[in-house]
Image (cartoon, grey):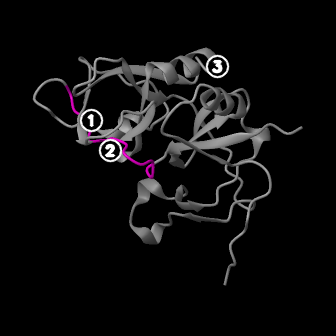
Amino acid sequence: MAPRYFELSDDVYLPGRWELGKLTDAEGGKEVWPWLLKRGEPAHFPKRPVAPIRSPGRPLDFSHAAFGIPVVHARAASIFTELAPADVQLIPVSIEGQSDPYFILNVIRIVKCIADKASAEVRYWTEEDGLPEKVGKYSSVSGMRIDPTKVGDAKVFRTWGWHVALIVFVDINEALERAGATGVKFKEVTGPGQVLNRV
């Protein structure tokens, strides 16, 4: 049986949930540059970052701070450290009004595995877009499918050229669901995809 992988995202439609704002440093509230946490490499902060609550509500085990930075409760963090210790960095974060331990989930693996033909639609940045540093990378990906034969031993990773996607192996998907982790949303990215009608 072919290995299965899922895109893990924040369930933004969960009723009564909280929403976290922009991560800031502990001194003076300067914003933490979000792409530091999407480059697929360890990040270091002199002091514990802070995640403000933008909209009060029920705390979640998995949620995104602004710009899609994953923040996890210790319950969910333990699953990632147990099943994929080489793929993640857990950075302690302070959340206003919360005494429970929370962590920024920094994914430190990037894998070039998006299956362009199996995905519904992919587009690339070109020279005409006027952003030379992005040429050759994805400008959009819809209905993403990956090629599991290119993943290797990674169990948690971001996709090369499209770092917004956070992908997990099926055992992490199942472990989070067994634990009843709140806020998680999964979408399978292996198997046949639904191709959009191209004109």
Q: Main secondary structure of the magenta part?
A: loop
Q: Are marks 1 and 2 in contact (CB under 8 Å)?
A: yes
Element assignment for label 1: loop
Percent position of residue 172, x then y: 65, 28
Residue that appears at 69% across and 60% down: 119
Considering only order in the chain, which callout, 3 or 1, is on the residue closer to the N terminus?
1
Amino acid at dot 1: Leu
State the image coordinates of residue 73 (x, y, percent, origin top left): 43, 24
Quadrant of image for the N terminus: top right
Q: Looking at the picture, does residue 185 appear above or below residue 28?
A: below
Q: Quadrant of the C terminus?
A: bottom right
Q: Earlier in the sequence, mark 3 or mark 2?
A: 2
- Residue at label 3? 83
Residue annotated with mark 1 = 23
Q: Which residue is mark 2?
A: 66
Rate crowding at label 2 as few (under 14), some (14 to 19) or many (20 or more) other CA atoms within 10 Å: some
User: Which residue type carries mark 2?
Assistant: Ala
What separation in Å lies between label 1 and label 2 (alpha carbons)? 7 Å
Rendering quarter of residue 33: top left
Q: CA distance from mark 1 to mark 3?
A: 26 Å
Mark 3 vs mark 2, CA separation in Å: 26 Å
In the structure shown, which secondary structural element does the residue marked by tag 2 occupy? helix
- Residue situated furthest bottom in the rendering: 199
Whole-percent x, y for residue 21 in the image: 27, 42
Residue situated in front as seen by the camera: 7 or 158: 7
